[in-house]
Amino acid sequence: MSELLGLENLRKVFPVRAAAGEPAGELVAVDDVSFTLPPGGSLAVVGESGSGKTTVARMVAGLETPTSGRITLDGEPREAARAGRGARKARARQIQMVFQDPYTSLDAKQTIEAAIEELLRAHFDWDADRRRERVAQLLAQVGLDKRQGGARPRALSGGQRQRAAIARALALEPRLLILDEAVAALDVSVQAQIINLLADLRAETGVAYLFISHDLGVVRQISDDCVVMHRGRVVEAGRTTTVLDDPQDPYTRRLLSAVPRPGWVPRRRATSGASA
Amino acid sequence: MTAVTSTPVTAAPSSRLRRWRKVDPVLILSVLWCALTVLVAVAAPLLAPYDPSQTDILAAAQGPSAQHWFGTDAVGRDIFSRVLYGARLSLLGPALVVVIATTAGTTLAIAAVWFGGWFDRVLTRVLDIAFAFPPLLLAVLSVVLFGPGLTAPVVALAVAYTPYIARVVRSAALRERHLPYIESCTLAGLSGPRICVRHILPNVLPLVRAQAVTSLGSSLLDLGAISFVGLGIQPPNAEWGLMVSDGRTALLNGSPQESLAAGFMIIITVVAFNMLGERLAERAEVRA
């Protein structure tokens, strides 16, 4: 089986500063995580906050350096973050990322068009007309019109900003797009639109997704495979439908039973109600 | 009886309109005064009724009259003309100080934030030490090096003001540095200098602007004080701080026009710059 992204025994340890009454120590955020993602695939990393899923995403993106372990892209190890200009640009065209909060992930002083154009100018040797064409194409792809493209983030809604962030991330035609809780900050109806958009974009461009989420409903819609993380470790991995329909690990079952649905009663309330 | 209060339905004002409505008289007066002094400095030869260095012993130490609106000084020079011409050197000094200090302070601050690590720690320490030097002491040292005139106090104050600018900009830039949009620029393969100049700088610029305008006021005051004690601009040049000093003898003899006129100009201009800087800072805060 071909492989786009490979993680081997990835580990990240953060030093913890001494708090009042506690000695300085170490926090193992990610512990021995391995998985692979095929080209054009979609893999979700699921877990509650603090499970290490975002740290995994940041290491894959190159925003954090693994303490140990290997990250490979097309079988080649990812180069060190601070390399020369050529390497830096090559890295950028491999992996791009969409962040959770669309209110801080775009430069407030830049119009959406200018933000996309800046990347095109930095990476491609195109003339102004060609760049303008590509900007228009990208905006159309994510469903933003001309006026929204010319606006600053402040004038756009959360969903529109996230569309803009996706357009910007796709401008470099990356092989892999990391979506770090990319729909978590949006209203449910907008969430559904963005999820549909992401599905369409994957079909159109063949980009692979590494989708970080705590929302199992969203994960089911967007991913082929999923990895469940708990306290830095992978507790369960497999096809998304298999994992979510027939969970083997007790933690996955707990996660699933915590999803609100019709007739659902929060566990704590249920027990206190029973004892009353 | 029910009183029907009709609520007029008005269109929500656009953000630009609302910003205009919020403009207060203090701000308008400050802007007008600052603009006026700059205009006076530029157009002094056209506006001044007399040559500012033309002495006339026969008309010395006169009170205000139709010929001499603010009277004349001890050697018969027209005080009104000297106040107008004085705007030139009085504003040129602060402008130079602020341009140098703002450029140096902002550059250092953004570089410190970008590189972080030991560079940031060393710079922060150096700035802490620089805070301990009073501007006037630096000015004295500078006069020893450069001799009296415009250069010495400007260099001294530029050095003294850089830490203030750098500290404010550093904290603002630090906040921006860790926002996802900067990380996304890094991931997009943009170079460090480009991210600093095209992304961090524009986002801290409102604050830089506010700090620069406030510094204009305080450096005008400091430069005036340096001239007053005789370390800055030298006679027979017209400069407000120097004029306050020149007018002291006349002041004791009962004709305070020269010191009063120049002192008044200093105070009002400093207040105007401070008010303007304060309002700009408020706006920068609102946006952040």
Image (cartoon, coloured by chain):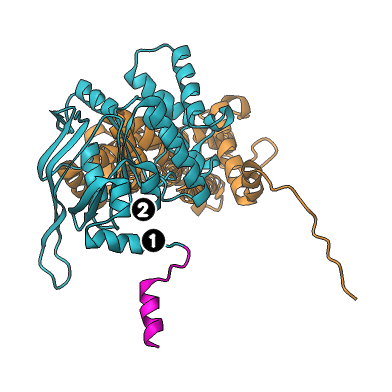
Chain colours: A cyan, B orange
Which amino acid, by three-letter code, is at mark 1?
Answer: Val
Q: Are marks 2 and 1 in contact (CB under 8 Å)?
A: yes
The single residue placed furthest to the right in the displayed view is: B1
Q: Is residue B32 left or right of residue A254?
A: right
**B50 above or below A20?**
above
Please state the horizontal and vertical placement of residue B187, each as a whole percent of the image: 29, 33
Please state the horizontal and vertical placement of residue A129, each as a whole percent of the image: 48, 12
Please state the horizontal and vertical placement of residue B197, each as a whole percent of the image: 35, 31
User: Residue A249 appears in which quarter of the rendering?
Assistant: bottom left
Q: First in sequence: mark 2 or mark 1?
A: 2
The chain letter for the residue carrying disc 1 is A
Q: Within 10 angstroms of label 1, few (less than 14), some, or many (20 or more) residues?
A: few
Residue shown at the point (18%, 33%) measured from the top left: A81
User: What's the magenta region?
Assistant: A262-276
Which residue is tagged 1?
A259
Which residue is tagged 2?
A216
Q: Nearer the viewer, residue A186 or A203?
A: A203
Q: Is residue A227 left or right of residue B203?
A: left
Q: Respond whether the residues carrying marks 2 and 1 are from the same subunit.
A: yes
Task: Name the element at disc 2.
Answer: helix
Q: Within 10 angstroms of label 2, few (less than 14), some, or many (20 or more) residues?
A: some
Which amino acid, by three-letter code, is at mark 2?
Answer: Leu
Which secondary structure is most common in the magenta stretch? helix
The chain letter for the residue carrying disc 2 is A
